[in-house]
């Protein structure tokens, strides 16, 4: 009988630390999954913001180009969001999109990205 009790206590002694270890591991995995999920959300938000800024800036640059180029006939009803999606938003990296935005800011209508968008719009 004493052997049965000793065996039971021995097994329970191993079960308690094992249960604690499993609880700690589960907590770590939950925290890590939430951290990765939050990182993904922040990255997606940053990408969406940069995309919106590119579209807004292209809209401004097209107005400037239209106002300063008298013999230019741009097609009406062009959706710059669609143009940007087709030309620039294939690479979803924040750094790449930010570089496109900075290029448009720094070079304006002389930017190769603006020239690419203009060429695409004129081909419609």
Image (cartoon, grey):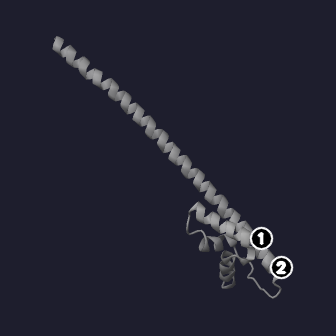
Q: Give x and y (percent) for residue 16.
A: 33, 24
Circle number at residue 60: 1
Q: Which residue in the rendered view is the most extreme toward the bottom?
A: 71
- For the point 79% across and 75% down, the residue is 63
| Picture layout, residue 12 above or below residue 104 | above
Mark 1–mark 2 Cα distance, whole angstroms, equals: 11 Å
Question: Which quarter of the image is occupied by the C terminus?
Answer: bottom right
Q: Is residue 9 left or right of residue 43?
A: left
SS type, badge 2: helix
SS type, badge 1: helix
Q: Which residue in the rendered view is the most extreme toward the front?
A: 106
What residue is shown with label 2? Answer: 67
- How crowded pointer 2 is (Cα within 10 Å; few <14, some 14-19, many 20+) is rated as few
- For the point 73% across and 69% down, the residue is 106
User: Going from the N terminus, do you reach mark 1 or mark 2 first?
Assistant: 1
Q: Is residue 9 left or right of residue 73?
A: left
Question: Which quarter of the image is occupied by the N terminus?
Answer: top left
Q: Give x and y (percent) for residue 3.
A: 16, 14
- For the point 75% across and 82% down, the residue is 74
Q: Give x and y (percent) for residue 118.
A: 69, 80
| Picture layout, residue 66 above or below residue 48 | below
Quadrant housing residue 69: bottom right
Quadrant housing residue 61: bottom right
Q: Give x and y (percent) for residue 70.
A: 83, 86
Q: Is residue 3 left or right of residue 57?
A: left
| Picture layout, residue 18 above or below residue 107 | above
């Amino acid at each position: 009988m004493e052997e049965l009790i000793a065996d039971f206590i021995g097994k329970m002694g191993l079960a308690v630390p094992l249960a604690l270890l499993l609880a700690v591991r589960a907590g770590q995995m939950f925290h890590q999954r939430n951290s990765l999920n939050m990182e993904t959300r922040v990255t997606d938000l940053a990408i969406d913001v940069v995309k919106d800024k590119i579209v807004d800036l292209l809209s401004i640059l097209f107005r400037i180009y239209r106002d300063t180029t008298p013999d230019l006939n741009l097609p009406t009803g062009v959706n710059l969001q669609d143009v940007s999606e087709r030309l620039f938003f294939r690479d979803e990296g924040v750094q790449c999109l930010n570089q496109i935005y900075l290029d448009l800011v720094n070079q304006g209508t002389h930017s190769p990205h603006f020239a690419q968008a203009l060429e695409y719009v004129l081909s419609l």
